[in-house]
Image (cartoon, rainbow, N blue to C red):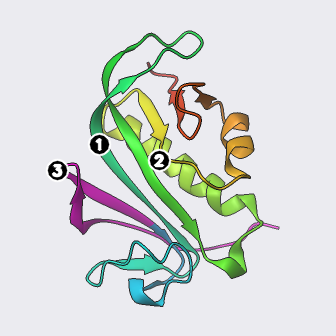
Amino acid sequence: MKTSYSLSEFEVEYNVQDSPVYRVTLGELMPSNRRKTIREIVDPISPTGSIGFMDVIRQDIYLPKIGEMDERIKTVLTILVIGIEPEFQGRQEYVRCLANRAESLAEEWGLNFVVADSIRNPKLPRVMKRRGYEFSQRFPETAMKRLKNA
């Protein structure tokens, strides 16, 4: 059974490391202060999604060597946070949708790497590994993926 939900995208009203934050939302737009997940990131101006949201930035970072990936500084799309509202958690469909969008955004922006930073959800590494992300022993909360066009 395929579920239908709306996807919205926009720049939010704050920056991270001098980079503008781009948000992708799932579901109907609602004020951030109504969000139940990831309450510590509440931007009173920018809306969130009734199902969930993802914030990403474009940034230059040092990529440690993982498998065939060389160590070097690269411009990447960094997933800062993925939040799924409690009543929608447990279904990988929503995380998969947001991860797919992160990868397609990276390609649209001419980037070859996606980095998921500060992964603290114990279930997420398994999901990311299945999607082709690799983890560094030096940075166990960070997953990296080289896109096919790299």
Neighbour class for label 2 at 10 Å: few (<14), some, many (≥20)?
Answer: many
Q: x, y (%) of residue 27?
A: 54, 78
- The quarter of the displayed image where residue 149 is located: top left
SS assignment at label 3: loop
Neighbour class for label 1 at 10 Å: few (<14), some, many (≥20)?
Answer: some
- How much space separates mark 2 and mark 1, taking CA atoms? 11 Å
| Residue wearing tag 3 | 18
Q: Amino acid at mark 1?
A: Arg
Instruction: Determine which of the numbered discs, if any, sits on residue 102 in the image.
Output: 2
Camera-near label (2 vs 3) is 3
Is the magenta region chiefly helix, strand or loop? Answer: strand
Q: Amino acid at mark 3?
A: Asp
Q: x, y (%) of residue 42?
A: 37, 78
Q: Is residue 88 left or right of residue 150?
A: right
Q: Quadrant of the C terminus?
A: top left
Determine if the magenta segment contains residue 41: no
Camera-near label (1 vs 3) is 3
- The quarter of the displayed image where residue 133 is located: top right
SS assignment at label 2: helix
Q: Is residue 47 left or right of residue 144?
A: left
- Judge whether 24 appears above or below 123 on screen: below
What span is in magenta?
A: 1-24
Q: Which is nearer the N-term, disc 2 or disc 3?
A: 3
Determine if the magenta segment contains residue 2: yes
| Residue wearing tag 1 | 58
Q: Which is nearer the N-term, disc 2 or disc 1?
A: 1
Residue at 29% from the left image edge and 84% from the top image edge: 44
- How much space separates mark 1 and mark 3, taking CA atoms? 10 Å
In the displayed orientation, state which residue is furthest to the left. Answer: 18
SS assignment at label 1: strand
